[in-house]
Image: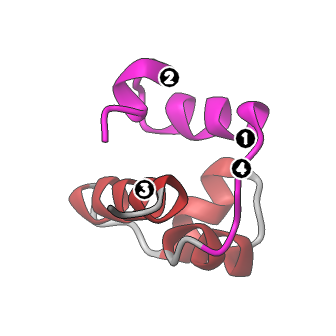
Amino acid sequence: MEDIVVKFGKRIRGLRKRKAWSQEELAERTGFHRTYIGMIERGERNLSLKNIEVFAKVFDLSISELLNL
Protein backbone atom coordinates (compact mmCIF):
# COMPACT_ATOMS: atom_id res chain seq x y z
CA MET A 1 0.00 0.00 0.00
CA GLU A 2 1.39 3.36 -1.05
CA ASP A 3 1.95 6.01 1.62
CA ILE A 4 -0.58 8.89 1.66
CA VAL A 5 2.24 11.46 1.46
CA VAL A 6 3.58 9.82 -1.71
CA LYS A 7 0.07 9.65 -3.21
CA PHE A 8 -0.51 13.32 -2.46
CA GLY A 9 2.82 14.24 -4.04
CA LYS A 10 1.89 12.35 -7.20
CA ARG A 11 -1.47 14.13 -7.22
CA ILE A 12 0.22 17.55 -7.02
CA ARG A 13 2.69 16.60 -9.77
CA GLY A 14 -0.13 15.39 -12.01
CA LEU A 15 -2.19 18.54 -11.51
CA ARG A 16 0.86 20.72 -12.14
CA LYS A 17 1.72 18.89 -15.34
CA ARG A 18 -1.88 19.11 -16.61
CA LYS A 19 -1.57 22.88 -16.27
CA ALA A 20 1.82 22.71 -18.05
CA TRP A 21 3.41 24.53 -15.11
CA SER A 22 7.00 24.12 -14.04
CA GLN A 23 7.83 23.60 -10.39
CA GLU A 24 9.05 27.20 -10.40
CA GLU A 25 5.69 28.46 -11.66
CA LEU A 26 3.79 26.44 -9.08
CA ALA A 27 6.12 27.81 -6.42
CA GLU A 28 5.35 31.37 -7.53
CA ARG A 29 1.61 30.70 -7.50
CA THR A 30 1.65 29.09 -4.04
CA GLY A 31 4.28 31.27 -2.41
CA PHE A 32 6.31 28.16 -1.51
CA HIS A 33 9.96 27.62 -2.44
CA ARG A 34 10.64 25.48 -5.50
CA THR A 35 12.63 22.96 -3.48
CA TYR A 36 9.64 22.56 -1.14
CA ILE A 37 7.43 21.82 -4.18
CA GLY A 38 9.91 19.15 -5.31
CA MET A 39 9.97 17.58 -1.85
CA ILE A 40 6.16 17.46 -1.80
CA GLU A 41 6.01 15.86 -5.24
CA ARG A 42 8.52 13.21 -4.18
CA GLY A 43 6.54 12.45 -1.02
CA GLU A 44 9.25 13.76 1.28
CA ARG A 45 7.11 16.35 3.07
CA ASN A 46 3.95 15.95 5.13
CA LEU A 47 1.89 19.08 4.56
CA SER A 48 -0.18 21.02 7.05
CA LEU A 49 -3.86 21.57 6.38
CA LYS A 50 -3.13 25.24 5.69
CA ASN A 51 -0.67 24.32 2.93
CA ILE A 52 -3.13 21.80 1.48
CA GLU A 53 -5.67 24.64 1.33
CA VAL A 54 -3.16 26.78 -0.61
CA PHE A 55 -2.76 24.06 -3.23
CA ALA A 56 -6.52 23.60 -3.49
CA LYS A 57 -6.97 27.32 -4.17
CA VAL A 58 -4.16 27.45 -6.73
CA PHE A 59 -5.64 24.50 -8.63
CA ASP A 60 -9.18 25.90 -8.23
CA LEU A 61 -10.37 22.77 -6.39
CA SER A 62 -12.09 22.13 -3.11
CA ILE A 63 -9.93 20.43 -0.51
CA SER A 64 -11.96 17.25 -0.90
CA GLU A 65 -11.42 17.31 -4.68
CA LEU A 66 -7.69 17.84 -4.16
CA LEU A 67 -7.54 14.94 -1.73
CA ASN A 68 -9.38 12.61 -4.09
CA LEU A 69 -6.40 10.30 -4.36
Q: Distance between the residues labelled 3 and 1?
A: 12 Å
Determine whether, in the image, residue 52 is placed left or right of residue 8: right
Residue pointed to by mark 4 = 47
- Taking the magenta stretch, the answer to whether it contains residue 53 is yes
Label 1 Cα crowd, 10 Å radius (few <14 / some 14-19 / many 20+): few
Disc 3 marks a residue whose amino acid type is Ile
- Residue 52, how many percent across, how many down? 63, 37
Picture quarter containing residue 17?
bottom left
32 is higher (above) or lower (below) than 48: below
Q: Do the residues labelled 1 and 4 touch (CB within 8 Å)?
A: yes
Which residue is outermost to the front? 1
7 is higher (above) or lower (below) than 30: below
Label 3 Cα crowd, 10 Å radius (few <14 / some 14-19 / many 20+): many
Disc 2 marks a residue whose amino acid type is Ile
Residue at image point 31% right, 32% down: 68
Q: Are marks 3 and 4 in contact (CB under 8 Å)?
A: no
Per the rendered image, the range of residues in magenta is: 44-69
Q: Distance between the residues labelled 3 and 4?
A: 12 Å
Q: Are marks 3 and 2 in contact (CB under 8 Å)?
A: no
Q: Which of marks 3 and 1 is nearer the N terminus?
A: 3
Q: Which of marks 3 and 2 is nearer the N terminus?
A: 3
Residue pointed to by mark 1 = 51
Secondary structure under badge 3? helix
Q: Which of marks 2 and 4 is nearer the N terminus?
A: 4
Residue pointed to by mark 3 = 12
Looking at the image, how many numbered discs can be counted on the residues? 4
